[in-house]
Amino acid sequence: MDYADILHRCFRCGYCKLPSSYQDINCPSYLAYRFESFAPGGRMWLLRAWLNEEIATSQRLSEILFSCAACGNCTEHCVFPKFKSDLLNAFTSGRSELVNEGIIPATVRDYFKSIHLYGNPYNLPESDRDTWAEGLGLDAYENQEYLLYIGCPGSFDERGQRMARAVATLLRDMGVSFGIMGRHEWCDGNEVRTLGEFGLYELTAKKNIDLFADAGVKKVITLSPHAYHTMKNEYPALGADFQVVHYTQLLAQISDSLPTGEKKRSLSVTFHDPCYLGRHNKDFYSPRTVLERLDGVQVVEMDRSMNDSLCCGGGGGNFFTDILPSGDPGSPSRTRIREAAETGADVLAVACPKCAKMFEDAVKAEGLEDRLWVCDIAELIIET
């Protein structure tokens, strides 16, 4: 197994599951299950024992390894600089070994099957990928400055579709030159890779890389931080040759052109940092730059923000596999919603379609629909 040489270096000090204040639990799977085996340090010890044949391959081991939300809190707060950056790589490598052995949770197996057969995890025909754009009058990509890449949640999930429509409408109205590929898009593959199916990931990524190259794409705007991360950091090793920005980064660059005028209301807004824009790519400021330019918006921070932000629990494929049960009161998403409500904010602003869905469901579960509005940044700009 790759990264096996770092497993013995962990002695479970526990900082990996905490924020920098040491006052909360910041590891989503440990927060949900409260067993040390579900913490990063516990996984390191389990992987070492497994490789040393002290424990056998089992469905229980598989469940523990696949529960990781890949949020990056462990790599942020581990106190050992010589190997902290490879903690998630070790967990992904362990998952890959289980994939090769065929010992994986049923929901993970079904996710891979859906990507392989349909090109998306929703088991829907690819011809449905452009339904989110109906009525918007958007142009197909043909040598515009940017390709707007929507991805699976934005194309097929009802909550993601609303976010996709808002982002595309805002960019169109701001005069950004972009086109879409609609039904010709393909899964970005980030979760496929994170779940350890490297062969399927490579096929998926190369399909996008070839598609973009054939179309002459030089610049990509992504709706999802997950797509942004994998296209920016993983695709180049497979031959990708294009620039990629998350839509909030582009909005921050052109924030002087944001719509202005009389606002309908004043709002207190708290922002949730998506893991793949924040901790993984160290951009905590683009979304806040946009929010701070909006008239009538007052930004308030949660106790856990930026590099200490608590993951919604949807990363690492869990948005589709639900190994961290999102409906439980102790789930990361419901815990985060309670934290957002404690700020007194009117709005929980997000910049990821997975976060939007996870938190909107959590607001309903917590009975906070009348107190807290989960709103994407583009929706906030358009609707206020």
Image (cartoon, rainbow, N blue to C red):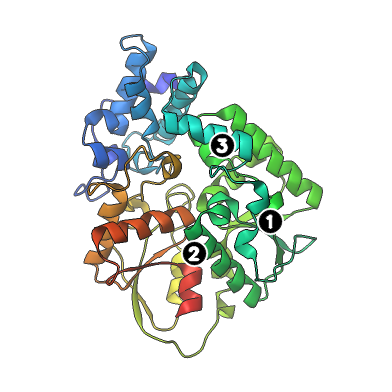
Which dot, 3 or 2, sits closer to the camera? Answer: 3
Q: Amino acid at mark 1?
A: Gly
Residue 361, placed above or below residue 113: below
> First in sequence: mark 1 or mark 2?
1
Q: Position of residue 329 (x, y in %)?
A: 22, 49
Residue 193 visible at all: no
Disc on res. 286: 2
**Label 2 crowd (10 A; few <14 / some 14-19 / many >=20):** some
Q: Residue flagged by tag 2: what amino acid is it?
A: Ser
Quarter of the C terminus within the rendering = bottom left
Q: Nearer the viewer, residue 38 or 113?
A: 113
Report, in whole angstroms, how far the alpha carbon at label 1 lies from the one at label 2: 27 Å
- Which SS class for mark 2? helix
Query: Residue 1's x, y, as percent?
Result: 48, 18
Q: Residue furthest top?
A: 53
Q: Which residue occupies 40% across, 57% down? A: 273
Q: Label 3 is placed on what type of residue?
A: Ser
Residue at which label 3 appears: 114
SS type, badge 3: helix
Q: Residue at x 62, y 40 (%)?
A: 118
Q: Earlier in the sequence, mark 3 or mark 2?
A: 3
What residue does disc 1 label? Answer: 182
Q: CA distance from mark 3 to mark 1?
A: 19 Å
Residue density around tag 1, few if under 14, some if 14–19, many if 20 or more, within 10 Å: many
Nearer to the camera, 86 or 206: 206
In the picture, measured across the screen, residue 338 lies left or right of residue 143, that is left
Q: Position of residue 67 (x, y in %)?
A: 36, 34
Residue 354: x and y, percent?
A: 45, 53
Q: Is residue 310 above or below residue 143?
A: above
